[in-house]
Amino acid sequence: MVSLWQKIRKTGRVAEPPPPREDGAAPAAAAELAGSVQIRHVDAGSCNGCELEIASAFGPVHDAERYGARLVASPRHADALLVTGPVTRNMEVALRRTYEAVPQPRLVIALGDCARNCGVFAGAYGVAGAVGDVVPVDVEVPGCPPEPEAIVSALRGLTGR
Ligand code: SF4
């Protein structure tokens, strides 16, 4: 046990080097975040591929919390919504209500091609539309799914760190 602690202490903190920050693309409301953004994730109908990449972005390898981004459990504690998937009919009202529960100024990040334009689910009978059809979108992260570096880069653009 002691040798394990010694090894942890000797190794220190190891994470991927920071991806480039998306400068100039941040919405005006991001200036009020003061380097920290609390995020409520909403799966509006994702296949869970985007969720795996979000987990990776916030895991020890990419460690998005280094840049002031943090996932929270309630929209009332959040500055921004991180929405994945096309918005299914069953989630349309829930997404709208979650958005209204976030205090002002609130931001919405549409993560993944499905969130941006319904992606591979476009035209499916259970799909109400893209995220932008239900709530205003401030930041888009393209990809199916977006790589963790792209997610961290977009979040860095919001926190400015
Ligand atoms: S963008 Fe791709 S990975 Fe993400 S929810 Fe859609 S199909 Fe799944």
Image: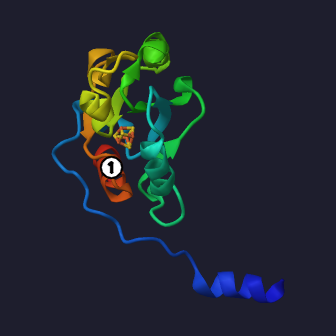
User: Is residue 59 rendered to the left or right of residue 32?
Assistant: right
Q: Quadrant of the N terminus?
A: bottom right
Residue 105: quadrant of the picture: top left
User: Is residue 8 rendered to the left or right of residue 68?
Assistant: right
Tell me which residue sits at (22%, 32%) in the image.
Answer: 28
Please say whether residue 100 is visible from this viewpoint.
no
Badge 1 amino acid: Pro
The spot of residue 106 in percent (x, y) is 37, 25
Query: Does the closest atom of ligand 1 sit within 8 Å of the Cβ of label 1?
Result: yes
Neighbour tally class for label 1: few under 14, some 14-19, many 20 plus, Cα within 10 Å: some
The spot of residue 136 in percent (x, y) is 28, 20
Tell me which residue sits at (46%, 59%) in the image.
Answer: 66
Q: Quadrant of the C terminus?
A: bottom left
Question: Quick one: which residue is furthest to the left in this view?
Answer: 24
Tell me which residue sits at (49%, 34%) in the image.
Answer: 41
Q: Is residue 113 above or below residue 17?
A: above
Q: How is the image coloured?
A: rainbow
Which residue is more in the foreground, 41 or 52? 52
Ligand 1 quadrant assignment: top left
User: Is residue 16 rendered to the left or right of residue 124?
Assistant: right
User: Is residue 145 rendered to the left or right of residue 20?
Assistant: right
Residue 121: quadrant of the picture: top left
Q: Secondary structure at mark 1?
A: loop
The number of callouts visible is 1
Tell me which residue sits at (58%, 80%) in the image.
Answer: 12
Mark 1 = which residue? 146
Please say whether residue 14 is visible from this viewpoint.
yes
The spot of residue 141 in percent (x, y) is 28, 42
Which residue is more in the foreground, 131 or 60? 131
